[in-house]
Amino acid sequence: MRKYLTAVAVAVAAVAAPFHAQAQTAGAVVAKEPGKVSMAEAVRVSATVQAIDKATREVTLKGPDGNVFVVTAGPEVRNFDQVKVGDQVVARYVEALSLELKKATGGIRERVEREGGARAPQGDKPGVIVGRQVTVVADVVGVNAARQTIRLRGVKRTIDLKVRDPNQFKLVKVGDQVEATFTEAVALSVEPAPAKK
């Protein structure tokens, strides 16, 4: 699965980079209560298939502002023969982060990673979805009121985290723990050419 996550990340970078400024982005604080904050951001980018070289598996794509670039569909791209000139290649990327304060738990620090994904069924247009979730439980080992930062020691490293909300910052004390869950998902799909008006 890590191979697919890497392949999809490269594909999204190839699709998104040439016209990142035109990507549709939505970011927001999803939920907020004392000791708990969740944030999410979603990005959608698309390009139109201009040409296909079946022998080399190269696809020429055109972004919304007319920029043209070429990507190679590797052997992991199932149903490559279903792609047609005029189709839309759509990349959707979502990431979310939730932080929860655990008051003076004295529990163990931990890090848990999970990955998953799926490819399009045989015969459908090419598509893939991959996701990854990392949950970390870290100790609060320092609080800096002047900078409004907290120092967190996890399993692999120690980081300083800026807490922008003063009400949330007041809740954190040395000896507490913070549970952070980071989730990211990427979906690449090839969609039929839009109907002509």
Image (spheres, grey):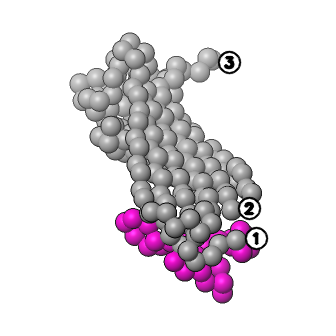
Q: State which tag comes first along the sequence, 3 or 1.
A: 1
The stretch in magenta equals: 141-170
Which residue is painted at 57% across and 53% down in the image? 97
Q: Amino acid at mark 3?
A: Lys
Residue labelled with disc 1: 167
Q: Is residue 196 above or below residue 114?
A: above
Q: CA distance from mark 2 to mark 3?
A: 51 Å
Asked where in the image residue 33 lies, by quadrant, the reply is: bottom right
Q: Position of residue 107 (x, y in %)?
A: 49, 63
Label 3 vs label 1, nearer the camera: 1
Tally of marks: 3
Q: Position of residue 119 (x, y in %)?
A: 39, 26
Q: Is residue 55 above or below residue 169?
A: above
Q: Residues within 10 Å of mark 3 (few under 14, many from 20)?
A: few
Q: Amino acid at mark 1?
A: Asn
Q: State which tag comes first along the sequence, 1 or 2.
A: 2
Which residue is painted at 74% across and 61% down in the image? 34
Q: CA distance from mark 1 to mark 2?
A: 8 Å
Q: Quadrant of the N terminus?
A: top left
Residue labelled with disc 3: 197
Q: Are marks 3 and 1 in contact (CB under 8 Å)?
A: no
Residue labelled with disc 2: 34
Q: Amino acid at mark 2?
A: Pro
Which residue is painted at 55% across and 59% down in the image? 179
Q: Are marks 1 and 2 in contact (CB under 8 Å)?
A: yes
